[in-house]
Image (cartoon, helix red, strand yellow):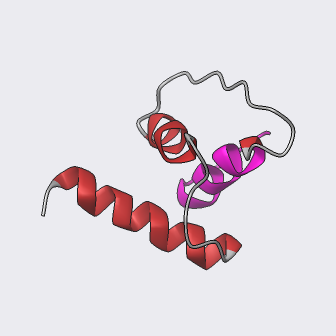
């Protein structure tokens, strides 16, 4: 199994654990991965597009304080 597939499994497990969802919407996985890779990330999505989860899930997965 590749490192990317393993990381995606961890992301999906945490998505299910914290939010109860079985899948990511559109670009959420890529956005979350970018944040976990500690890259500056700017997201524009429509209302209801899933922006909040893009910041909340990494905040739950990483140590420290997150300001959203």
Viewer-side residue, 16 vs 36: 16
Q: Residue at point 65% right, 45% down?
A: 54
Q: Residue at point 68% right, 44% down?
A: 55
> Which quadrant is home to the N terminus?
bottom left
Q: Is residue 40 depicted above or below 46 in this figure?
A: above
Residue 11 seen in render: yes
Can you give x and y, in whole percent of width and height, for residue 21 in the image?
A: 64, 72
Left or right of residue 4: residue 2: left
Q: Residue at point 78% right, 39% down?
A: 67
Residue 65 seen in render: no
Can you give x and y, in whole percent of width and height, for residue 40 in the image?
A: 54, 21
Q: Residue at point 55% right, 39% down?
A: 27
Can you give x and y, in whole percent of width and height, for residue 44 in the image?
A: 72, 24
Residue 17 falls within the magenta-colored stretch? no
Residue span colored magenta: 52-68
Residue 58 falls within the magenta-colored stretch? yes
């Amino acid at each position: 199994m590749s490192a990317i597939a393993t990381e995606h499994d961890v992301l999906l497990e945490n998505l299910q654990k914290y939010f109860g969802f079985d899948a990511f919407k559109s670009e959420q996985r890529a956005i979350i991965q970018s944040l976990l890779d500690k890259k500056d990330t700017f997201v524009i999505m429509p209302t209801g597009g899933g922006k909040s989860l893009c910041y909340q899930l990494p905040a739950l997965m990483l140590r420290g304080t997150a300001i959203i």
